[in-house]
Amino acid sequence: MKKKVISVILTAAMTGMMFAGCGSGTENTGNSGEGTASEAVGGTESTQTADNGASSGETYKIGIVMYQWTDAQGTNIQNFCNYLEENMNVEFEYESTFYDDDAQVSCVENLISAGCKAIISGYDTNIVAAMSTCADAGVYYAVALDHITEDDFAGADPGEYFLGGTKQFGGDLAELGKEYADAVADAGIQNVGGISFPEWAFTDAPEIYASFQSELSAQGITVQDLTFTPGMTSDEVQQAAKDLVNQNPDMDALFGMASGLDYVYPAIQGSDVKLIAMGYDTSVASLMDSGALLAAGNNNHTQAVASCVARIINALEGNSYPDAASGTYNEGSIVNGVAGYPVISNKEDLDNYMNYVIPEDGAKGCVTVDELKNCIISYNPDATLADLNELTNRSLSEIVEARQ
Amino acid sequence: MDNKKNEVFFETKKLTKKFGEVVAVNQVDMVIRTGEIRGLIGENGSGKSTISSMISAIHTVTDGEMLLYGTPYKPKDPGDARAHGITMIVQEMGTIDGLTIAENIFVGDEKRFAHHGIINRDEMNREAEKVLKNIGVTDVDVRKPASSYSLETRKLVEVAKSLYYDPILFIVDETTTALSQNGRKIIYRIIHELRDKGKAVLFISHDLEELINNCDVLTVLRDGKMVDTIEKADFDENRIKHSMVGREIKGDYYRSDFDGTHGEKVMLHAEHISNEVLHDVSITLHEGEILGLAGLSGCGMHQLGRALFGLDKVKEGRITAAGEAGSEVSISSVQDALNCRIGYISKDRDKEALVLPASIKENLLLPNLRKMGALISPRREKEYAQKQIDFLAIKCSSMNQAVGELSGGNKQKVSFGKWIGNNSKIIIMDSPTRGVDIGVKTTMYQLIARMKKEGYSILIISEEMPELIGMCDKILVMKDGKVTNAFNRDETLSEQQIIEYMI
Amino acid sequence: MKSITFIKRNRNNLVCYGSLALVIVLFAIITKGQIFSAYNLKSLAGQMVVLMIISIGMIFMFAHGTVDIASGAVAGLCTMIITLVLNATGNVPVSVLAAIVTAVALYLFMWFVTAYLGLMSIIASLAVMFIARGLVTYILSLNDGRINIIHYDMIQPLKSNVAYALIAMAVVAVIGILLFNYTRLGKYCKAIGDNPISAEQSGARLKLVKFWCYVIAGCCVGLASLFLLARSGNVGKNIGSGTEMDVMVAVILGGMNLNGGTKSRIGAAIAGVITNTLLSNGLTIAGVNQTYITLVKGIIFIVIIGMTLRQNKSVAEMPR
């Protein structure tokens, strides 16, 4: 009997708390939201009074979901977001989940509960489910690390709350392949192989590689056909890379398109085969010094996030670009932004990359607040999608030029 | 070591132990001298085991003190007690199944065989053999795991292990209940030898007879208090029983009648059954009959009990029981047995008969669940359990108390209750009074006698001859898997007559 | 004095609901009541439905002494079955039925291997985990790594309309509670978890009881996969992965001893899942830095486990 009594009491207490919380909760959020908003406005006004007053003065809370926050990519994005928070009327909330579609929806829901009005996702795998969650809540949703096509929605209507994806590799795969090819040609390599994740996982790989291949073949360098790994794990990639090297004793360089530094490098470590990597981490400097690495490259996450933020602020303020329907990187009715992919093939590139693409202080980075505001309609009524795409697709040299 | 006899070397002063609110031992002053076998007797829950556990540091002392040679004795743990010369054989199993006999003997003390961190097994095994030989056990391979030996052998291994440390005080806590006549004789011999060497023995047992025969002084406990200390010259069974229980025990401990008659209806019948252990065994149990099975522990009587309940498979022959509506039903599984209203009380109460962590209520209900319908109402459960608890006078704080917390006698009452409650008509009892004190034993015997009158058919499997002679209408004696003889109820029947056919 | 014995007797309940109450109060304060917003309560229901249904099924496994680690992989395979059948027939009930049949079949395979071939149950479930995960990966590789649901609009309401999740949880919980607390099956199950020999001697048919436990577990996993699919929107390689661990964490948070036996409680699944979901949800809403979030979760987990473990010691010393 007593057992029952205690469970009944507890349940009653909890329900009571829930209702009590419900009531005060809305009040609280309202109050605190206003509080932070006015503070932010104060801060904004003092520093940016020169800007036009088109901004409504509200602080926009934006959620970001990534695979993880403790890696280089996460740090880079957080640095940029901190910079935006300090200098614009935006506030960020972070969530992470590792390749789990169900958990991704939970992350989106949690961010919405936390008061986010828009969500930027690194994920694109469960776009339909995540999008429907956002649409139900009236929250905008943009994908930062991949472009989205109508096929991704499998016939469903994305709806007005979907703000599109972000085209990677500067939107020009052939150009990227050529950049990598240049890096190899300079190094006097004679025989190159290539390894990539399965085609379904990395759909852009064949096109990049084709350009890479034709560019080098034209210069008389042997380029083998692209090898696909059987799966996505480190072990599968390493095994495939080892097999490839063993079968081609003449090969003196390998284009690691499947997480080059993390997955492919361990397979050829210690051999004479040089690495050309898609990917970047802190080991790049030393590997380049030793000559084991000919080139590396990475998505420009700052540009990707900046592109999403601009589109989100426009949408939140009820604005849209006049040229939205005819964006260069659009896929049918879906608007896509763009982000560059800096290729690093020498010490100078590396220094520039570290100083301007992934600096700790966002103000020194590849997109400044002023540049970004210039692409937001409330700050600049003439802003176009083309402006935004140009801003977020600057190459390493263009960024350097802009900062100097 | 001091070999003087009759010297006070161990004392307890106002020794008290509380478990939460329960006072298990209440201000006990006891004196033990060298060169004596001190018996400790009392009903279940009277505090015997608690006292011995405090002396050997298994339990902590709540209040009062213990003195060893006049100085305060405060052992930190059993190892410390051992270092002070006090060792104990416990009621429960004290060996570890996975270890070899030798490893069991030296567990916790392997270092003595270590050379540069590596244990010399040959040396350990030789030493173990020597230790066992000291107590007269020679037919044990110390390299084999403990699990490959019988309960009895493992108990003897424990005894050997305890004696290895040359104790001044050797505590035997209800060890003999687990042993056969043979094993008991070894223990008796050992404790007498120890006494003759000027050591002391604290001997705890339920068996009054063995205490009277072996002890020099008896201390009687009741409800945690020391109520009497009796010298050998004054040993008298009735006086002891009286002080234990605090009231007069009536003369009719067993059944008082010698009327061996019973109903004619055959309730359970085994025809020429054989399996790995049994060889061409036939028995018949009638309505209202108490049938006894006597024998040594390896004679197959326990397996016969299991086979009759459908637990062990029979290779040849047939077991039948009276079904509903007078039909004959063949028994080949527990389900068949249950359908024929057969109940079975295993001899291993803690491991087989009861679910120790489960409550009294849950245990009592378990065999009756089949009959409680699809949805079982908690109210009916409670009514059912309360009825059994009242009927058997089970001492417990509530029906939700875990059975594992009960004393041995009350545990056994629960296992009886399981089958009485579910309307079984045939009950197979394997060693029903093992480890149960006199008070509860009396109740059990009265209950069994009453059940006979009510028409229950009962099969008692026991190693205790007096109990079989006292209770059964007919006793079958078994040896080597065969029934060697049968005795009908008779006032003149003696243990000797039966034992003749057991050995 | 009475109150102390009361606490001792009900320690299991106190841990179970106590940790839930603790988490609720903690986050109510930290998030200034934001976790109780209507939207968040709705989200919570959606977030816990998969775990709740599977955990309730798993209680029957844990209670009788089986630790199952295949639930996530089997749920993943079931989402694929639903998708394939739904894409082919456009009939939701039929596809769910197919998923439940698949899950039950896999669980019965485990049962057979454990009961008749005498393999340890955890090995059997490991094998099933590999089979299910392997099938998902293989079929996905034939479909460019991802299978889209043609008729997503047919199951999408399961995600967007929280009533479905609430009803499903309520129905499964009620059936679970009835089976576990008020029928022979549940009682045998607990007895088997503590002492199979005694249970058998008291009339429990071990294989049969376990058979039904595996069937229940299979049904729950199959049903839960429908909600998993509705939430995921399509079938990817990692679908359902890690669910088995979440289940264990949840029921431990609920005060369940994974060894099973008489102290098993179906409430552990219900309270534990709520606690577990609230933990992740509350920490995000509270704005805890992602860098420390796992650490914070770990600390809270250890605190709750600490409370659970202490209870088992209370029986150490008892009078004989």
Image (cartoon, helix red, strand yellow):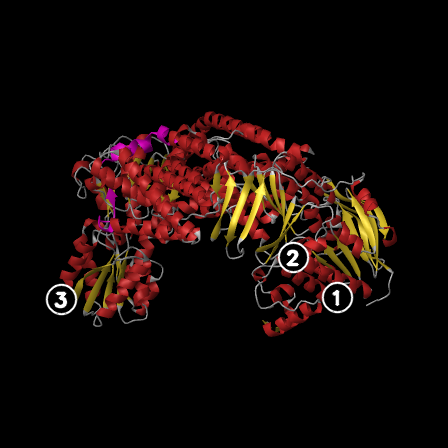
Residue displayed at 34% across by 34% down: A117
* Residue labelled with disc 1: B166
Q: What chain letter is assigned to the residue under label 2?
A: B
Q: Which amino acid does the dot numbered 1 rest on?
A: Asp
Whole-percent x, y for residue A109 in the image: 37, 36
Percent across and percent down for residue A236 are 30, 59
Asked if labels 2 and 3 share a chain, the reply is no
**Distance between the Cα atoms at labels 2 and 1?**
39 Å
- Tag 3: Cα neighbours inside 10 Å, few (<14), some, or many (≥20)? few
Residue kind at label 3, given as amino acid type: Gln
Residue mark closest to the camera, 2 vs 1: 2
Q: Is residue B20 visible?
A: yes
Q: Can residue B120 be spotted in the picture?
A: no
C13 relative to B190 in the view: left or right? left
Q: Secondary structure at mark 1?
A: loop
Q: How far across and how far down the image is residue B301, in percent?
A: 59, 52
| Residue nearer the viewer, A23 or C196 | C196
Q: Would residue B102 be found to the left or right of residue C166 on screen?
A: right
Which segment is the magenta one? C140-165
Residue B144: which quarter of the image?
A: bottom right
What's the residue at 58%, 68% (across, down)? B143
Which quadrant holds the N terminus of chain A?
top right
Q: Is residue C251 magenta?
A: no
Residue B501 — which label?
2
Disc 1 and disc 3 on one polypeptide chain: no
Residue at mark 3: chain: A
- Residue where numbered disc 3 is placed: A219
